[in-house]
Amino acid sequence: MDPKSIDINIHPTKTEIKFDDEHTLYAILRSSVKHSLGQFNIAPVLDFEYDTNLDTPYDYKNKNASTPTVEVDRDFNPFVEQRSSGKQTTAFKKQTLNNWDSLYVGLESKGTRSEHDFSQVEFESEEQTASIFKNDSTIDNIQKTYQLHNKYIISTVKSGMLLIDQHRAHQRILYEGLLKSMTVKEAVSQQLLFPLQLHFSPNELTILEQVKEDLEATGFVFSKFNKESIDIIGVPVNVPDSEVSIILEQLISDVEQEVPDSHFSATDLLAKSMAKSLAIKTGQSLNNSEQEHLVNSLFACKEPSVSPTNRATFITLNVDELDKKFM
């Protein structure tokens, strides 16, 4: 794989990397695993389409198995003692094999050492190696992030620490996710039990009609567009019913106040407006898992350093800068 196709700068602690072509890599891995499982019959499958590529590519499959033979000397008794040349030895019968005698070369020169002399025997001790990883329970109990005044998230890195604005960081995460949903047009909607009817002025309804297609790409489902109101029967996942009117009103306000710019489309404006409305607010308390998920999701973005409005999402404080504060 070309190293240029791997991005190693998506995570502050370098524990994650990003591939430019993730779908192809996933397809290769999935195909390799599926081929191995099918080839060696590791998992039982029910496949009505027979694939000859999964056959064992060995010639042994067409050969008959040979039954091994076992020869036993029924007269051999290791507890029977025999006298030979005036010395008492334990009976031991050696089979005649090629080069078997070479294993005993040099043993006769050991001389008078007793067979049971264990005075110089050394026992091998098992090599003690330090564990690379700590106990899982210890790792789980380590707190990696901290929340400051329900506004900032502090995360440690090798060079110092990161101070992350939780509201701006969440805006960036939602913004890129919404842009992807609008581009791919595969957003997931949750159906409402009862249709939600919202009233707007004629001018506001005109603006909503202009961005209707982009709204549907994010997960909104409209049933009716009347002269004074609209009926909504589906909203994006994780968007509560009570927030729908606030999101649409904020969107209308942003469209009215936005200065026309050829560099930004209606899709980009819609993504910015919805990200601003749905992002967690300053003052909202987050538990440890939510903090870590926010940090990891931020550095998985393409532009984690700035919010959709080009404001910094985090700052870095190096150890040298902290040392200077104590001088």
Image (tube, rainbow, N blue to C red):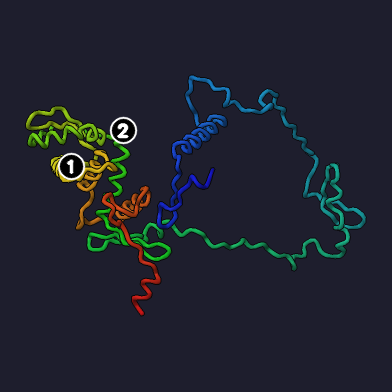
Q: Residue 250: where, in percent of width, then height?
A: 16, 44
Q: Residue 206: where, in percent of width, then height?
A: 13, 33
Dots 1, 2 in contact, CB < 8 A: no
- Badge 1 marks a residue whose secondary structure is helix
Q: Residue 131: where, in percent of width, then height?
A: 52, 60
Please tell me which residue is depicted at 53% across the width and 20% down the height of the picture. Answer: 50
- Badge 2 marks a residue whose secondary structure is loop
Residue at the disc numbered 2: 186
Task: Specify whether 50 is left or right of 295.
Answer: right
Q: Residue 81: where, in percent of width, then height?
A: 82, 51
Please tell me which residue is depicted at 74% across the width and 65% down the height of the picture. Answer: 118
**Looking at this view, is 220 or 101 the one in front?**
220
* 326 to 236, vertically: above or below: below
Kindly indicate the quadrant of the structure image that contains residue 311: bottom left
- What amino acid does circle 2 point to? Glu
Image quarter in which the C terminus is found: bottom left
**Looking at this view, is 20 or 104 the one in front?**
20
Label 1 or label 2, whichever lies nearer to me, is 1
Q: Residue furthest bottom?
A: 327
- What amino acid does circle 1 point to? Val
- Rendered image: mark on residue 244: none
Please tell me which residue is depicted at 49% across the width and 29% down the height of the picture. Answer: 44
* 191 to 101, vertically: above or below: above
Kindly indicate the quadrant of the structure image that contains residue 120: bottom right
Residue at the disc numbered 1: 255
Q: Residues within 10 Å of mark 2 (few under 14, many from 20)?
A: few
Q: Residues within 10 Å of mark 1 (few under 14, many from 20)?
A: some
